[in-house]
Image: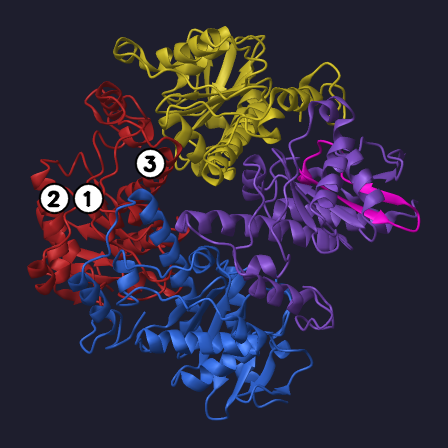
Chain colours: A purple, B blue, C red, D yellow
Amino acid sequence: MSKFKELKEKCWKANMEIPKHKLAVYTFGNVSALDPSEGIFAIKPSGVPYDDMKPADMVLVNLDGKKVEGKMNPSSDTPTHVVLYRFLSGVYSIVHAHSTYAVAWAQACRPIPVYGTTHADHLAGDIPVTEVMSDEMIRGQYEEQTGYQIINALKEKNLSHQDVQMILVACHGQFTWGETPDKSVYNAVVLEEIARMAYLSEQVNPDIKRMKETLINKHYQRKHGKDAYYGQAKNKQE
Amino acid sequence: MSKFKELKEKCWKANMEIPKHKLAVYTFGNVSALDPSEGIFAIKPSGVPYDDMKPADMVLVNLDGKKVEGKMNPSSDTPTHVVLYRFLSGVYSIVHAHSTYAVAWAQACRPIPVYGTTHADHLAGDIPVTEVMSDEMIRGQYEEQTGYQIINALKEKNLSHQDVQMILVACHGQFTWGETPDKSVYNAVVLEEIARMAYLSEQVNPDIKRMKETLINKHYQRKHGKDAYYGQAKNKQE
Amino acid sequence: MSKFKELKEKCWKANMEIPKHKLAVYTFGNVSALDPSEGIFAIKPSGVPYDDMKPADMVLVNLDGKKVEGKMNPSSDTPTHVVLYRFLSGVYSIVHAHSTYAVAWAQACRPIPVYGTTHADHLAGDIPVTEVMSDEMIRGQYEEQTGYQIINALKEKNLSHQDVQMILVACHGQFTWGETPDKSVYNAVVLEEIARMAYLSEQVNPDIKRMKETLINKHYQRKHGKDAYYGQAKNKQE
Amino acid sequence: MSKFKELKEKCWKANMEIPKHKLAVYTFGNVSALDPSEGIFAIKPSGVPYDDMKPADMVLVNLDGKKVEGKMNPSSDTPTHVVLYRFLSGVYSIVHAHSTYAVAWAQACRPIPVYGTTHADHLAGDIPVTEVMSDEMIRGQYEEQTGYQIINALKEKNLSHQDVQMILVACHGQFTWGETPDKSVYNAVVLEEIARMAYLSEQVNPDIKRMKETLINKHYQRKHGKDAYYGQAKNKQE
């Protein structure tokens, strides 16, 4: 029996949150969970409907992107996960989803402005969007390059992946991450809700302004700062 | 055993209406219920998911904002509830929610105009929105100041908190109140629906006008006036 | 035991379709069912939540608008139903609802243009909207006057109530009718869906045109004309 | 016992996906399934609610459009299915639906532009819309002419029905097809989601551009090209 049984179960359980929260239809979307001490992650198999998936179907992949256990092919987005795990220290779970409102902003190639406290409770700035991929990158190892797009976007915008745990890939969809599968899925659900609220806010007031910095920082710090006081333990984030 | 067992149960039950009516995701939102003779209210613990909450988890707080019973921290919005209970006589329950359409108007910093009878059945004027908080207030006791923002907005607009049982806090979300937990939750659900209808009405007709005063007053009075005739008893309001 | 037991059950069952199809929240909306041979109709009691309602709670009212049986007050909209039953021959059930998209058009005071075959399958023209009520009518018997608003709108637009079984009351909501409770509820659900589709169609194409007459008539006639061929029996309409 | 029992069951099961995925209300929409060796297809009976339908109610029709088995009338859209089966080789199932967002684009008479990878995973170009039907065609065999409208649209736009398995009929709704009932229903659900995402994307960015060709082709080929690598088997498409 695989010593990664628990990892697969955690990964499967997190994947089952995707249809539950309506983050994707059919087989779209995928969640992975990393065992950092072994350098192995579990990920959803490619093109398998959520209803049919069992914990044992999760595929194990190492940080070179090689399958190390599993009967099925891993998600075609696996190389993106590999790149993100390599570059984002302390990240042990990643979600990729095609949720409706997040996709709308990604297809519109616009970052999501901070319009309110729901957003600022999770992020002290706009939710970033990558550049549209260059033809050269598309013709290369596409899914791997998607990972580099994300890493480059964080670098260029000078964003920490601890502070910013969600990003839109232009013309595509969302990637979110966290220390645990619970947290990466939580971030995906929250991103979708923020995307929906921001869209509606612009419809209600086309001249809407970004929320002011003092209010952004107040809300972000009360949940994430060194003196955070939200939740049941110091620095607990949700 | 706590003599506030019943209060906690009422409070818990009202909190469970938040996810049921989709007024917030995860741990967002909170309801409190006051025992006016004791000057004690029960409120949701901070950052606890609704599915995991039991009646015994409700935290008891007095009107000085001090926890008097409970293992967990009370909602971080507790100081806002304290201020509202102090200033709004006859209010025994308060709801704070981040429901999607109410947030859209709050983020847009616009009051919701009376466009129809669904609105006027509950309120004879626009649903007010507070000012954006000043930097000075933000740097003070933020959640307490949020309470004062609401009290100030009612005062400046010359609104009675009996007639207007719902308000938008700019860039944030909704607060509603009532004599009972049922009523404060009812007001939160109704506000969300009114917010959605008003948004769609403006999309369907960008030149839409406020409903005329005679019609506003007719609908408000038939439910709330001294000769109210809606429902099963005189002056019964829903 | 009331000889109207069956009528009350039919009425109750139709009222329970209102929350099921999300045509209204809480106690909003109401359905009535007429026994034409007795001149008596059953209607929802005023201000009672759907979950708590039993068939025995339905109130019986005659065509003079007098309660003839029932412990509770009938819906406050009862006088509107009375007027409609008096003027609309062959109508044995009426629905009043506050469904979101129908209300949006009603609040926008716009008739819903025929943009597609889903609409034309049910109606060969726009879904009409009444005038905003005059102050004189508002100050009179308001709910009764709402009935006259509807009758007047049909007359002024030269519409037959057999062909047009749905209408928007300006700034208010929808009324639909039919030969049976099933049909009047069906019309309410269809109106909401047509209202939603028309709203979205205008958003997708602000220069959208009404569907052409030949196509409107073809779709209407295949379901409602003398040579109707939709469904399982000649002239069966849905 | 009919030797087409299995065909009827497959057809019934696929029809039951229509309400499950909210592709239509009441009796709207229909799915058919073809036995190509016999030249017989099963199709939903006309005007029967989904909840009441049993596998035995499916009607068998041959490719001349004649009913060969079944107590009820087949869907009034049967002649459209006949034309499509005759012209679209390798297609063994067809779906007709009135899903909300697909209808919005159909009523707006606009093809759906490729704005993102969710779209390009399924189609390397815009989702086409037919011309509005000429009066001559409307006055002819209308449902049969609807089939020719679709065939003509594919021909004029030089589109292969293997590559493009979904189309909007102007002012009407969607038709989708595939090798199996699972695939034709899948295409209907995906079309609705793409339609919704494209609508929202244009709202978020009115100056949105089509996604660039290199990215369209990359996504389409990774699922459908000769070296497709998505899913569990070579060329498996979802």
Provide the residue designation for mark 3.
C198
The quadrant of the picture occupied by the N terminus of chain B is bottom right
Look at the image and give the residue range highlighted in magenta. A29-51
Residue kind at label 2, given as amino acid type: Ala
Task: Say the numbered circle drawn on residue D166.
Answer: none
User: Do pointers 1 and 2 mark residues of a single chain?
Assistant: yes
- What residue sits 32% from the left and 73% below the top? B157
In front of the other: label 2 or label 3?
3
Counting residues from the start of the chain, the first of labels 1 and 2 encountered is: 1
At 76% from the left and 34% from the top, the residue drawn is: A75
Contact between labelled residues 3 and 2, with CB atoms less than 8 Å apart:
no
Q: Residues within 10 Å of mark 2 (few under 14, many from 20)?
A: some
> Residue A152 versus residue A185: which sits nearer the camera?
A152
* Residue that label 1 marks: C129
Residue at screen point 13% across, 53% down: C147
Tally the marks.
3
Gap in angstroms between the C-alphas marked 3 and 1: 15 Å
Magenta-drawn stretch contains C193: no
